[in-house]
Amino acid sequence: MVTTLLVTFALTVGLALVVLLSVAAPTLRRRGSRTMARIDAAAERALPVLRHHRDRAAAQLADRLEAQRRAARSPRDDHGAARAR
């Protein structure tokens, strides 16, 4: 129960920050806010890492799906070939 409450709180606060920053970011950038500059710098450092992990996960998923497709296809193909003989 406490874990659910903490997760809900964290998600709510995180969503509020995202909304707040998405609204306030253009104004903060125009004014030359140091906080916005730090957030932008952190995002520039984090995005390549996140993209790398996303691409790696997508490649692993594609490999797993292809392996499942091959595994699901081969018994049917062998069974069908045996029936045809």
Image: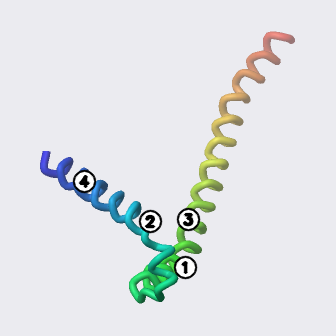
- Please state which of residues 67 and 59 is positioned toward the viewer in this rendering: 59
| Percent coordinates x, y for residue 17 in the rendering | 35, 65
Amino acid carrying label 1: it is: Glu
Lateral position of residue 8 relative to residue 39, left or right: left
Q: Which residue is mark 2?
A: 23
- Left of 43 or right of it: where is 19? left
Q: Which residue is mark 3?
A: 53
Q: First in sequence, mark 4 or 3: give its number.
A: 4
Earlier in the chain: of badge 4 and badge 1, it is 4
Rendered residue at 55%/72% (across/down): 47
Task: State which quadrant residue 75 falls in.
Answer: top right
- Residue 25: percent from the left, percent from the top? 46, 73
How far is the residue under mark 1 from the one under mark 3?
15 Å
Sooner in the amino-acid sequence: mark 1 or mark 2: 2
Residue kind at label 2, given as amino acid type = Val
Vertically, is 72 above or below 46? above
Q: Which residue is mark 1?
A: 44
Whole-angstrom CA distance, mark 4 to mark 3, is 24 Å
User: Which residue corresponds to mark 4?
Assistant: 7
Closer to the chain start, of discs 3 and 2, is 2
- Closest to the camera, between mark 3 and mark 2, is 2
Q: CA distance from mark 3 to mark 2?
A: 28 Å
Nearer mark to the viewer, of 1 and 2: 2
